[in-house]
Image (cartoon, rainbow, N blue to C red):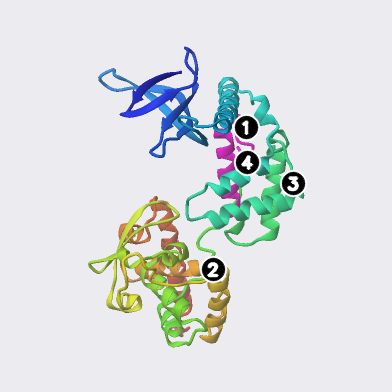
Amino acid sequence: MGKKDIKGQKTINYSPGPGINVRLRGKKLANGKISLYLDYYVGYTKSEANMIKTKRKIEYLKIYLFEPPKSPEERQKNRENLELAQNIRNKRESERLHNPEGFISPQKKKVNFFDFCQNYEDNYKKGDLRMIKGAIRLFKEHTGEEYLKPKQIDAKIVSSFKDYLLLKFKGETPYSYFARFKKILRAAVDDGLFTTSPAEGVTCPKPDGLSKAILMPEEVVKMSQTECGNPEIKRAFLFSLMTGLRYDDVSKLKFKHIQNGQVWRLQGKTDKRVYIDLNERALKLVGHFGKPEENIFNLPSLSSCLRTLKTWTKAAGITKNITWHSARHSVGTILLMNGSDIITVKNVLGHTKLEHTQKYTHVVDELKKKAVQGLPEIDVD
């Protein structure tokens, strides 16, 4: 066991010797304990100056050693934890030896795919977590199983899951769930459960245009003039209609995110930072400023908000199937109808790609066609 400095931090190497891709190391913490972690060698890159830069990955095991152990019990605990960590290191090393050759390690072959899904869900940090959870739940519902080995997940079962989604849902919902499921499978490839994704070559059709109902300016006015069962939901939804922010972003919006008449926010779904100018109506919806870390809107769960939203839109005399995401689609459409250029709309909505914004242009074109077709018939000599 040797000691050396890595990036200025004292580390302890528990797996010395050449030719090791995964090393067990320890870092001494302020509380005196040693935190064990795995240090992966994942190759290297060369700069234009021909300088070699080693690529590494760290996995913290959340396993700790007493340093120094002060009793027989602590020494025994150290031996047990170190043995456990070494076993994990050996498994990871085996996985790395198998995967480059297109093989699945023996340990990964026995993994329950649903256990992997649960771990993926528990560690997922992006704003579409609800859809990730839904995709896992629906796949389990479709298979009717609680335990599936990786070898049981093939193109056939993935394709049948896609068909199941298309039968169960309408609009963009099947595509959205299937896209998240493919994302999970790609993560499983990275983790060594598969050599290639079982979803490779399996596609789920995406409907053209926007499936969510869109509110026109006069309908937005109706909504603002109609009483809502929960004033906080009304205030937040109208704010979304002013800014295009998603439910996830609005529900977490704090007073510190409003600066100089702008919303300054990192979007949960895309991790893209957006700056949105607020007009007088939007600032009025914000209300009196509280403490920087306070939420601007105190909202219940999304499902509760959607139930209230359904009742509210019905009371306003609107028969469209309005969801919270309809506010975002409405903003994109109305901005284009009022002459905003597509780049401006892209920046307001925080889209990562222009193609996501272009779907709004198709909706505007359809609305124009309907407007022309709705002109009264006249006799022409």
* Residue at x 62%, y 56% (from the top left corner): 134
Mark found first going from the N terminus, 3 or 1: 3
Which residue is under mark 1?
Answer: 194
Which residue is under mark 4?
Answer: 116
Which residue is under mark 3?
Answer: 146
Point out residue 325 in the picture as x, y percentages from the top left corner.
Answer: 49, 66
The crowding category of the residue bearing disc 2, from other C-alpha atoms within 10 Å (few below 14, some 14 to 19, many at least 20), is few
Residue 103 badge = none
**Residue at the extreme left:** 260
Mark found first going from the N terminus, 1 or 4: 4
Mark found first going from the N terminus, 3 or 4: 4
Q: CA distance from mark 3 to mark 2?
A: 28 Å
Which residue is under mark 2?
Answer: 301
Given the image, on which type of amino acid does mark 3 rest? Glu
Under tag 4, what secondary structure?
helix
Given the image, on which type of amino acid does mark 4 rest? Phe
* Residue at x 30%, y 64% (from the top left corner): 256
Q: CA distance from mark 1 to mark 4?
A: 12 Å
Quadrant placement of the C terminus: bottom left
Relative height, residue 135 to residue 223 (above, below) = above
Relative height, residue 221 to residue 321 (above, below) = below
Camera-side residue of 284 and 86: 86
Q: CA distance from mark 2 to mark 4?
A: 27 Å
Point out residue 317 in the picture as x, y percentages from the top left corner.
Answer: 53, 86
Mark found first going from the N terminus, 2 or 4: 4
Point out residue 68 in the picture as x, y percentages from the top left corner.
Answer: 46, 29
* Residue at x 59%, y 44% (from the top left corner): 119
The part of the chain drawn in magenta is 177-202
- Is residue 172 something one can see in this rendering? yes
| In contact (CB < 8 Å): disc 1 and disc 2 | no
Under tag 3, what secondary structure?
loop
